[in-house]
Image (cartoon, rainbow, N blue to C red):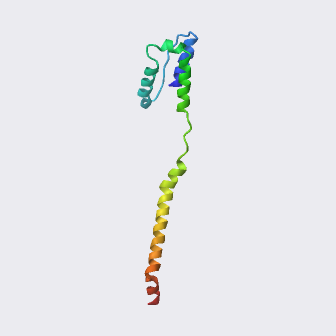
Amino acid sequence: VIRTVELMMGAHNQGKAQNWVLVTSNEFYSPIVERLTKILDEEASEKFQSKDFPRHLRERATELCIDVPDLVPVLVFIYLGLPLLGLQTLVFIIENLWEWSGVEDQIIMK
């Protein structure tokens, strides 16, 4: 949306009369139309000539383009590592109980 508005603003500032066709997927159509409607209200030509409007668009684009940390290793640990640790702990508990009970010695002695 931001890039589209920047292109429209550039064409408007050059004095070119143009028609714009925005091709999007159906799932993105409604949010894009809502956002463009908010940005390009009746005062669009005044906004295009304003010096603060492009700065606002750049700041918003910068906010949207922040790096998100990769959480795949954390998810792998949670979904694979923790169950394996739990299973290993359960095996050690059963092994210690088996040795503590002395059942193995009773079976060998008979």
In which quadrant of the rendered image does the C terminus lie? bottom left
Could you say where residue 34 lies in the image, as x and y percent from the top left? 42, 24
Q: Residue at x 52, y 32 (%)?
A: 64
- Relative vertical location of residue 34 with respect to residue 72 in this rendering, above or below: above
Report how many numbered discs are placed on residues in the image: 0
Could you say where residue 51 lies in the image, as x and y percent from the top left? 56, 16
Q: Residue at x 53, y 31 (%)?
A: 63
Q: Residue at x 46, y 83 (%)?
A: 104
Q: Residue furthest right?
A: 14
Q: Nearer the viewer, residue 33 or 103?
A: 103
Q: Residue at x 54, y 18 (%)?
A: 52
Q: Residue furthest bottom?
A: 110
Q: Nearer the viewer, residue 26 or 108?
A: 108
Could you say where residue 14 lies in the image, as x and y percent from the top left? 58, 11
- Relative vertical location of residue 50 with respect to residue 34 in this rendering, above or below: above
Q: Nearer the viewer, residue 56 or 71?
A: 56
Q: Nearer the viewer, residue 62 or 12?
A: 62
- Relative vertical location of residue 3 with respect to residue 93 in this rendering, above or below: above
Could you say where residue 84 lies in the image, as x and y percent from the top left? 49, 62
- Relative vertical location of residue 2 with respect to residue 9 in this rendering, above or below: below
Q: Quadrant of residue 27?
A: top left
